[in-house]
Image (cartoon, rainbow, N blue to C red):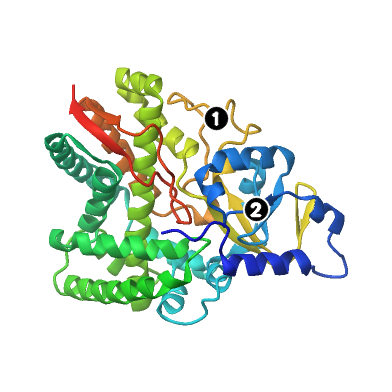
Amino acid sequence: MRAPDGEGPGPRKRAKRARSEPKASGDQEPDVRAERALGLLDPTSLAYWRDIHGTLAPLRERWPVVRSTAGDFEVLRHADVERLLRDPRLRQALQSMLANQGIDRGPLFEWWRFLINNYDPPEHTRLRGLVGRAFTPRQVARVRESIRGIANALLDDLLLRGEADLVETFCHELPLAVLCEMLGVAPEDRARFGQWTSLVSSAFSAVIPKDSVPAIEAALVRFDGEVGELIKRRRARPEDDLLDGLIHAEEAGDRLRPAELRALVINLLFAGHDTTKALLANALWTLCAHPGELARLRADPTLVASAVEEIARYETPIPSIPRIATEAIEVGGVRIPEGSYIALSVPSANRDPRRFEAPDRFDVTRADSRHFTFGFGAHHCVGAAVARAELHEALAVILERRIAFEPTIERPVWTAFLSARRPEALPARISAG
């Protein structure tokens, strides 16, 4: 799904307002000269998505903060992003993501307000506590065995084919099958749920083409209805899995409300599927593009754990983390007015040379890969352990079976205007050595 190059009427409208009429708190006025001197980042342009690192690096080296056409400001450096993810003066911005694009009613708007990442403490603390009780270490340990079985079956199929698009086969099917199994979705329903996750996840882009909103909302209505039926059936016939854990999650007598539970299950399905699909695709391409590092990994499979973190740092699927400033703040000498929509750039922070030595070098032995791909602080991704397990076990199986992927393209085209960044396609020949 793409928007025309340079188009994005919702975000552009907000950015124009922010540049011409900055909102400040108290009697202090923002440093207008400093603001006008800032660089400009354009996430509504195709060029940004096609070369995200090449676009961000020179901006990051000149400015800690830049203006953005998809909001008000974008923060580029690791230390600033880490500090702001801890800062209680910044609140969640999901509601503003829709408002920026003129969506203030309808199924998407109504469902959106129940998402866990749409809340701040104390409501977020309540929901996070309930959800955390379902993501137990036992659930994560159990799912590892399942991941290996699914990965082996998918690789068997790929070897029979001999050539396939890895994005739409292995990378798409593995996380979808794992999540559907964890949440009790029948195998015959996976394809349908997979279509819905892809559509719903596109609503989290900074640029949603207006003509795609009806399809997203239609998918969401059907998705919500199916999840409601799934929960109803599971209440009648409980099983010991993640869905049961969510249904029965409670803390001090408090339970997830029905709308919260349905929204959470949908959230886990689309976020866990789409993001992990992208992370797997990024991993396979990055390893293929760095044969020396792949050889080191084959020679020493104990490096898989550090390789997983390095992949997440080096080629993150997360473009940015949005926040709203509840009061005027200062970042790198730049005064950001109260009410500003701020994007914390994950790709830029993850390759900040102030934090990482030779950040543009992919190194599977890197000991320090403290990245923001799974967030940070109170809003750290609740499913991060499962995503890491999927990538870890998938790579382990590929190494054990000596599976070789030979891309039939020189370099991939990266997705544009989506919530999870990845190669659009990764056609490759598949063999076992």
* Left-right relation of 20 to 299: right
Q: Position of residue 129 (x, y in %)?
A: 43, 62
Give the mark nearest the N terminus, 2 or 1. Answer: 2
Label 2: which residue? 74
Residue at left offset 16%, top offset 42%: 149
- Pinpoint residue 170: horizontal percent, then vertical percent: 24, 43
- According to the picture, the residue beneath numbered tag 1 turns out to be 360
Vertical arrangement, residue 235 with respect to residue 425, above or below: below
| Residue 332 drawn above or below residue 405 | below
Residue under the point 24% across and 51% down: 178
Say which quarter of the image contains residue 233.
bottom left
> Of the residues shown, which amino acid type is indicated by label 1?
Asp
User: Which quarter of the figure has residue 261?
Assistant: bottom left
Disc 2 residue type (three-letter): Glu
**Position of residue 408 measured from the top left corner of the image (x, y, whole percent):** 30, 33
Q: Residue furthest bottom?
A: 105
Residue closest to the eye, 146 or 154: 154
Residue 248 visible? The answer is: no
Is the residue marked by circle 2 packed among few (<14), some (14-19), or many (20+) residues within 10 Å? Answer: many
The local secondary structure at tag 1 comes to loop
Question: Helix, strand or loop at disc 2?
Answer: strand
- Give the residue at x 47% y 67%: 209
- Characterize the local packing of mark 1: few (<14), some (14-19) or many (20 or more) Cα atoms within 10 angstroms: some
Q: Nearer the viewer, residue 363 or 99?
A: 99
Q: Where, quadrant-wise, is the C terminus in this rendering?
A: top left
Q: CA distance from mark 2 to mark 1?
A: 21 Å
Above or below for 279 versus 382: above
Q: Measuring 83% from the left and 61% from the top, which residue is drawn there?
A: 30
